[in-house]
Each structure stands twice: as structure tokens, then as C-alpha cells.
Image: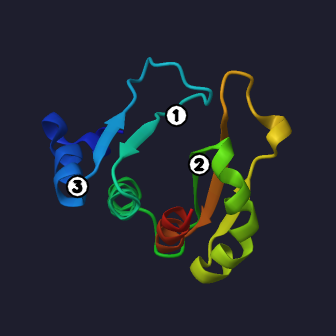
């Protein structure tokens, strides 16, 4: 995550300025349902968040090979998943990424969010995450 923060938070500040999105990264000791994972929260319009996501992926995965497979997990409010579920196949076809949604019965008891996993190379996960 040091790569995402940059020196004195410079990288996060640059992403926020360029994308017009508020970006928050959880502290290492914050509670997370996923071991060894930091949560990144964003607020802004859909297009601005999409731009911020692409910039974050580029920063975090810049050392990945062009065709190296990368997996990212996104938390989506459960109430937004009906429309997502109906559009997963068209999104996969458009972006070339693999998109899966955790079943509702696998929701953790403490959250109303579902996990969307996007798999592909850097360009495909950027496009897939933006589509989601």
C-alpha cells in the first residue's frame, strides 16, 4: 500500500485531484473481513470514481506484466446487485474480464455488501471494475 500512498500521501492526493474523487484508505489495523487487505473507499460521481479506480489500479499494479492475470475485489451494496447480476455477461463480453458476484447466502452477518471479483489483465480489470 505504500506505493498507493506515495511519499507523505502525495500519490493519493494526486489521484484525488486528477479524478475529482474523495479517496480514503483504511489503516492497517482497522477491522477488515479480509485478512491482509486494506479497504479503499471513494465518493464522487460514477465517472469520477471510475477514473480514480483506473488510476489506483495503474499505480498498484504497474509492475504486472501486460498479460498477467490480476484479481480485485469490490464491495457493492446488496441492494445494487440485482441490476449487476443481470448485466454480468454483457460486461464480461465488453471488457474481456471475468466478473463474479458472491451468493447472497455467503454474506457476512455484519455487512449488507456483496463481493464482486474482477479477474483479467490490468486493462481488463480496470474496464471491468469501471463497468461494475
Q: Residues within 10 Å of mark 2 (few under 14, many from 20)?
A: some
Question: SS at mark 2?
Answer: strand
- Foreground mark, 1 or 3, reads 3
Residue 86 drawn above or below residue 45: below
How far apart marks 1 and 3 lie (CA) works out to 25 Å
The earlier-in-sequence mark between 2 and 1 is 1
How far apart marks 2 and 1 lie (CA) works out to 10 Å
Name the residue tied to disc 1. 37
Name the residue tied to disc 2. 73
Picture quarter containing residue 19? Answer: bottom left
The earlier-in-sequence mark between 2 and 3 is 3
- Residue 50, position as x, y percentages in the image: 40, 62
Name the residue tied to disc 3. 20
Picture quarter containing residue 87? Answer: bottom right
- Residue 60, position as x, y percentages in the image: 38, 53
Query: Residue drawn 61% across and 31% down?
Result: 34
Colouring method of the image: rainbow
Residue closer to the observer: 65 or 72 = 72
Query: Residue drawn 21% across and 43% down?
Result: 6
Amino acid at each position: 500500500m505504500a506505493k498507493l500512498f506515495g511519499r507523505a500521501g502525495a500519490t493519493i492526493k494526486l489521484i484525488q485531484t486528477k479524478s475529482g474523487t474523495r479517496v480514503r484508505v483504511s489503516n492497517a489495523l482497522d477491522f477488515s473481513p479480509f485478512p491482509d487487505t486494506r479497504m479503499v473507499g471513494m465518493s464522487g460521481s460514477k465517472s469520477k470514481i471510475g477514473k480514480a479506480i483506473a488510476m489506483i489500479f495503474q499505480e498498484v499494479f504497474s509492475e504486472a506484466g501486460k498479460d498477467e492475470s490480476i484479481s480485485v475485489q469490490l464491495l457493492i451494496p446488496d441492494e445494487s446487485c440485482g441490476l449487476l447480476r443481470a448485466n454480468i455477461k454483457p460486461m464480461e463480453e465488453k471488457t474481456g474480464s471475468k466478473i463474479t458476484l458472491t451468493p447472497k447466502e455467503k454474506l457476512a452477518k455484519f455487512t449488507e455488501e456483496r463481493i464482486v471479483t474482477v479477474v483479467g489483465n490490468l486493462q481488463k480489470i480496470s474496464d471491468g471494475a469501471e463497468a461494475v
